[in-house]
Structure formats: C-alpha cells, structure tokens
C-alpha cells in the first residue's frame, strides 16, 4: 500500500515535460539586429526586431527501467539510516555527571587469574645408582699401546699417468688444429693455381704478393661521399670569409682553407675512379 502511494505521488519524466510545454506551438524569440562594425552601413530597417524560432530540441533519452529503478531506490531506504533518529532523549538539567558517578559507569572486567602450571619436572624420588670408579691408569695404558704398536705404512695416492690409455699420444685438439691448418694451406694453394692459370689471375697474384689489394666498391663510395661532404662544409666556410683580408690571422686562415680545399679536390679526383688499389706493405713499413 505504501509503495503505491509513493508511485502515485511522484510524476514521471514524460509528465514533467508535458507540464513544461503545454502548447505544441514553437516558442518565438524576439531579437534585435546586431550592430554593424562599419557605422556607415547602418540602416533604419535594423530597428525592426527579428522573430527567431529556435530549432526543436530532441526528445530526452529515457530508459525503460527508470520507474523501476526509482521504486527500488525509494523502497530500499531506511528511516534514520544515516542521520540517526529524528528525536534523541536528552537528560534534564539536573542529570549531569556528579562526583563519584564515574566509577559506576566503568565496565566491570573480570580479574585475571593465571593458571598455576608446573614448569619444572618434579624431583625424582628414586635413589641414583652409583657406579664404582675404575682403578685403571688410562694414560699409561695408552702410552704402552703406542710404544709397542708398529708404524703405519703411508698410502701412495699419486696417480700413475703412464698407465693411461692415451699416454704418450698427441692430444686430439692438436690433431684437429693441424688438420684445419693443412686444409687452409691446401685451399690457398688451389686458389694460387686457379689464379696463375689465367693472365689476369697472374697479374692479381703478383699484385697480392706486392701487397696491393683492390678497394671494395662500397667502401670507395663511402669514402668519396665523406670527402664531398667535407669539401662542401669547408667551401661554405670559405665563402663566408670577409672580403677585406688585412690582418695576419685572416691571411693565414684563408691560405690554410685554400690548401685544404685543393687537397680535398685531389682526393675526390683519385677516389672517383672505380679501380683503386691499396698498398698494405707501405702501411706496415711506416707503422
């Protein structure tokens, strides 16, 4: 019965919207013309107010479980659940705490009585058996036993390596190393024979003996690109020098930069060719 009364008392969202908009006619808003930025463009017609009809708002979304959730929320409430009872009993003016009343308000606690437990074992009542002491002289007996005993032979625990199966033989890792070196020498001999079979191979073998090795194309391209970048940077710095070279430091700097530019140009011209040989013998001799 109480729930039905609550439901009848609270209007739904559709009823509230209908009460706010009783008529189906759109609401008209009367506005004035905006003030023009240019005062010379003012017009008398701008004094006539404008009727502006705002666009109709979309219907507000309403869940189909809204009424059910409202009923469950209202039904689950408890009286005085968060703020306490509406009226609290208050003592009279003569009901204040007086002297001596504090002891009666204290809770009664039972006194602690520890259990008396025997922590130590009881003293034995049986008489102990007393063993007669021996009259032997253990020191003299030990001395006589060591004097009369023969010395122990030392144990020979040193291993006898001559009885091993691979005693006196070459280790396997040395044999493998020798075999790999022999294979390398054989492959080098085959390569030399293959080179000596053709005239170009003979020339290449002769060059390799002299220490001349052809430079790879990829490495030559990288060196050439680096030389060109250095030349461009140095040339841009040279172009930024002042036109009037009237002091000794300016003259020395200009001469030095020109020398570096000429050197870079010669290197670029050398590395522009595809067939470049590198002499390693001269490098090792200088080192």
Image (cartoon, helix red, strand yellow):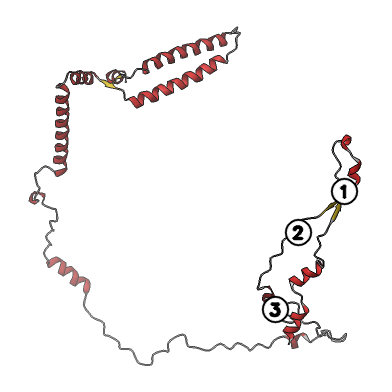
Label 1: which residue?
32
Between the C-alphas of marks 1 and 2, the distance is: 21 Å
Question: In the rendered image of this protein, does residue 84 appear above or below residue 49?
Answer: below
The residue depicted at 45 percent of the width and 12 percent of the height is 262
Question: In the rendered image of this protein, does residue 81 appear above or below residue 272?
Answer: below
Any mark on residue 56, and which? Answer: 2
Query: Which sits earlier in the primary sequence, circle 3 or circle 2?
Result: 2
Residue contact at pointers 3 and 1, CB within 8 angstroms: no
Q: Residue 30 in the image: state x and y as whole percent.
A: 86, 53
Q: Residue 105 in the image: state x and y as whole percent.
A: 74, 86
**Which part of the image, by quadrant, shows the N terminus?**
bottom right
Any mark on residue 71, and which? Answer: 3
Total of numbered circles in the picture?
3
Q: Quadrant of residue 184?
A: top left
**Pointer 2 local density, CA inside 10 Å: few below 14, some 14–19, many at least 20:** few
**Which part of the image, by quadrant, shows the C terminus?**
top left
């Amino acid at each position: 019965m109480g729930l039905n009364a609550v439901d009848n008392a609270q209007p739904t969202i559709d009823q509230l919207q209908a009460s706010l908009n009783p008529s189906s006619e759109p609401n008209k808003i009367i506005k004035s013309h905006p003030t023009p930025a240019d005062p010379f463009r003012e017009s008398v017609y701008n004094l006539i107010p404008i009727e502006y009809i705002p666009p109709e708002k979309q219907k507000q979304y309403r869940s189909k479980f809204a009424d059910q959730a409202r009923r469950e929320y209202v039904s689950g409430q408890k009286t005085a659940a968060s703020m306490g009872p509406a009226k609290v009993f208050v003592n009279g003016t003569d009901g204040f705490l007086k002297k001596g009343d504090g002891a009666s308000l204290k809770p009664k606690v039972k006194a602690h009585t520890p259990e008396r437990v025997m922590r130590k074992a009881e003293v034995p009542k049986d008489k102990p058996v007393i063993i007669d002491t021996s009259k032997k002289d253990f020191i003299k007996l030990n001395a006589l036993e060591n004097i009369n005993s023969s010395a122990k032979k030392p144990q020979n625990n040193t291993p006898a390596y001559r009885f091993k199966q691979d005693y006196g033989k070459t280790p396997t890792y040395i044999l493998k190393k020798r075999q790999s070196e022999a294979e390398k020498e054989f492959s080098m001999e085959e390569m030399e024979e293959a080179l000596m079979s053709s005239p170009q191979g003979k020339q290449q073998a002769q060059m390799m003996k002299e220490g001349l090795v052809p430079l790879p194309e990829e490495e030559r391209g990288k060196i050439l690109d680096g030389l060109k970048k250095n030349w461009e940077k140095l040339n841009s710095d040279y172009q930024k020098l002042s036109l009037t070279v009237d002091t000794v430091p300016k003259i020395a700097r200009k001469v030095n930069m020109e020398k570096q530019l000429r050197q870079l140009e010669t290197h670029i011209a050398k590395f522009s060719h595809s067939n470049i040989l590198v002499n390693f013998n001269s490098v090792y001799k200088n080192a």
